[in-house]
């Protein structure tokens, strides 16, 4: 496999290759790279929302996430304006509660 050309390529490759049994680790990785000053990540019960704020890096991250088992298993809806909603398991929501709030 060739080396990624940019940091964005590296991040996308990491996301796409993430273990399908480690959703907690994937979401913590994404959270740490999200541009929170422009977009938001909110957790309300088992509803997890990503809002890009129009920021291209956030949109790039969501684009990479589309190719993961996480997306296939938990995607609920996508909305105009860069919001994507997931309905996650109660155990995953509890594991993320220390990191993400409403």
Image (tube, rainbow, N blue to C red):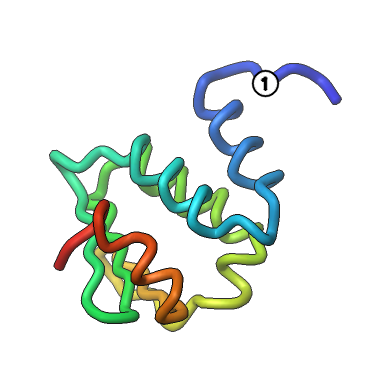
Q: Assign a secondary structure to mark 1.
A: loop
Quadrant in which the C terminus is drawn: bottom left
Residue 70 spot, x, y in % from top left: 58, 66
Q: Position of residue 40 (x, y in %)?
A: 20, 54
Taking the spot 45% from the left edge, 41% from the top edge, the residue there is 29
Q: Residue at x 22, y 76 (%)?
A: 44
Q: Is residue 94 left or right of residue 66?
A: left
In-front residue for pair 46/90? 90
The quarter holding residue 82 reads bottom left
Residue positioned 46% across, 43% down in the render: 60
Q: Is residue 21 above or below residue 31?
A: below
**62 or 23: nearer the eye?**
23
Q: Position of residue 5 (x, y in %)?
A: 64, 16
Quarter where residue 73 is shown:
bottom right
Task: Residue 59: tell me if it is visible.
Answer: yes
Q: Quadrant of residue 58?
A: top left
Q: At which x and y percent is residue 80?
A: 29, 71
All told, the count of numbered labels is: 1
Q: Residue furthest right?
A: 1
In the picture, measured across the screen, residue 81 lies left or right of residue 75, that is left
Q: Residue at x 41, y 75 (%)?
A: 86
Q: Quadrant of the N terminus?
A: top right
Residue 82 visible in the picture: no
Horizontal arrangement in the rendering, residue 59 relative to residue 40 (left or right): right
Q: Decide: few, some or many residues near mark 1? Use Cα within 10 Å; few <14, some 14-19, many ≥20.
A: few
**Residue highlighted by disc 1:** 4
Q: Is residue 22 above or below residue 43?
A: above
């Amino acid at each position: 496999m060739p080396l990624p050309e940019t940091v964005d390529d590296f991040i996308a490759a990491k996301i796409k290759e993430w273990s399908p049994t480690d959703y907690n680790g994937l979401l913590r990785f994404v959270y740490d790279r999200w541009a929170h000053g422009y977009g938001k990540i909110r957790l309300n019960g088992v509803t997890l929302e990503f809002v890009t704020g129009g920021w291209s890096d956030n949109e790039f991250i969501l684009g990479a996430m589309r190719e993961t088992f996480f997306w296939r298993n938990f995607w609920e809806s996508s909305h105009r304006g860069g919001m994507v909603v997931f309905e996650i398991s109660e155990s995953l929501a509890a594991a993320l509660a220390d990191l993400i709030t409403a």
